[in-house]
Image: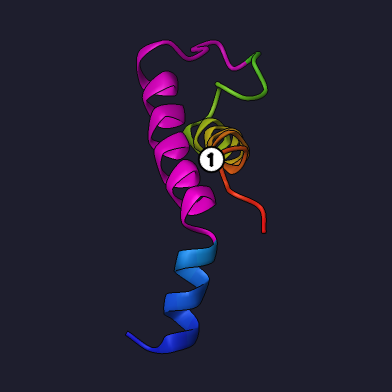
Amino acid sequence: MNKPLQEFLCTYKFIITGAVLGSIFGFLYYYYIGCKTGACMITSKPFNSALYGAVSGGLFLNIFKKSK
């Protein structure tokens, strides 16, 4: 792996991990609980639900990042 990519992944590992886990949980929320009528803006489509979960997960795990 090249050095800039390795530094990027090391710097943003919590945000990337949170975004991946959040998108998975967002999709699972859509699949098992989501709004089936289409009236809900976030949970009516799997992409919206996964995107919302990715942003939420990235922001949540960002609070555990140590500052310099």
Three-letter code for the amino acid on which mark 1 is drawn: Ala
Residue on which the image places disc 1:
54
Query: Is 30 contained in the magenta span?
Result: yes
Q: Position of residue 10 (x, y in %)?
A: 46, 66
Q: Identify whether 4 is placed above or below 27.
A: below
The quarter holding residue 60 reads top right
Q: Position of residue 4 (x, y in %)?
A: 50, 85
Q: Residue at x 47, y 35 (%)?
A: 22
Q: Residue at x 54, y 60 (%)?
A: 12
The region drawn magenta spans 12-38
Residue sitting nearer the eye, 5 or 46: 5
- Helix, strand or loop at mark 1: helix
Query: Is 15 contained in the magenta span?
Result: yes
Other residues around mark 1 within 10 Å, as few (<14) / some (14–19) / many (≥20): many
Visual colour scheme:
rainbow
Q: Identify whether 41 is placed above or below 1.
A: above
Q: Quadrant of the C terminus?
A: bottom right
Q: Residue at x 66, y 53 (%)?
A: 67
